[in-house]
Amino acid sequence: MRKAGLTFAVAMVLAGVVLLREATRLPTGWTASGPGPGFFPFWLAAGFTVSAFAVLLREWTANQGKGERFLPEGAGKRIAVVFLPMAAVVGLLHYLGVYMGGLLYLLGYSRLVGRHSWPTVLAVSVGVPLTLFFVFERWFLMPMPKGIVLEWLLYGR
């Protein structure tokens, strides 16, 4: 278990360093029209890297016994329940887009896995993509992939 934890933590730190380097390729300071295009990626990468170092430090100092399993019994199924639908949404991103894909993922996950009531499921499944739409499309003026289905529904194209 210790070897797997340390390996993962080192990989996270390396990924964080790569993300930081890539984020600094764009201006990260304040421009006349607001934050530069690298501002948010830089600070997200910085937070990720600091968190990765914290995980590495925790793993390095942890007293874990040998012979522990990396994944507890039954954890693989729980991981697959989250990962496989998410991979399907990413695979269908061209057709569904970010908003429709997010709506379907949240709808299925919160109802089938979370077993929440229909009013809660519908409020979250519709509310989160709508909020993301207004934040990215209207406030940041940053178009996100809408997918073939939503383009057809909205614009008839």
Image (cartoon, helix red, strand yellow):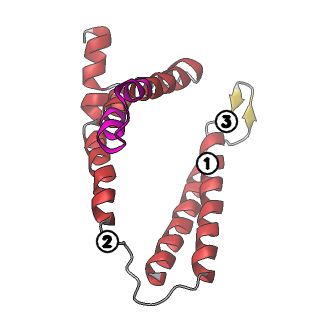
Asked if 156 appears above or below 87 in the picture, the reply is above
Query: What residue does disc 1 label?
Result: 44
State which quarter of the image contains the C terminus.
top left
Disc 3 residue type (three-letter):
Gly
Residue type at mark 2? Glu
Q: Looking at the picture, how far across and down is residue 142, in whole percent?
A: 51, 25
Q: Quadrant of residue 37?
A: top right
Give the label on residue 73, or none. Answer: 2
Task: Decide which of tag 3 and tag 1 comes sooner along the chain.
Answer: 3
Which residues, given as a range, are shown in magenta? 106-123
Marks 2 and 3 in Cβ contact (< 8 Å): no
> Residue 14: where, in percent of width, then height?
54, 67
- Left or right relative to 114: residue 42: right
- Assess whether mark 1 and mark 3 are in contact (beta carbons under 8 angstroms): no
Q: Measure the alpha-carbon separation of dots 2 and 1.
A: 33 Å
Q: Is residue 25 left or right of residue 28?
A: left
Task: Say how many tags the image has.
Answer: 3
Which dot, 2 or 1, sits closer to the camera?
2
Under tag 3, what secondary structure? loop
Residue type beneath disc 1? Leu
Q: Residues within 10 Å of mark 2 (few under 14, many from 20)?
A: few
Decide: few, some or many residues near mark 1? Use Cα within 10 Å; few <14, some 14-19, many ≥20: some
Q: Position of residue 153 (x, y in %)?
A: 27, 13
User: Residue 113 shows which numbered tag?
Assistant: none
Who is closer to the viewer here, 128 or 116?
116
The residue tagged 3 is 36
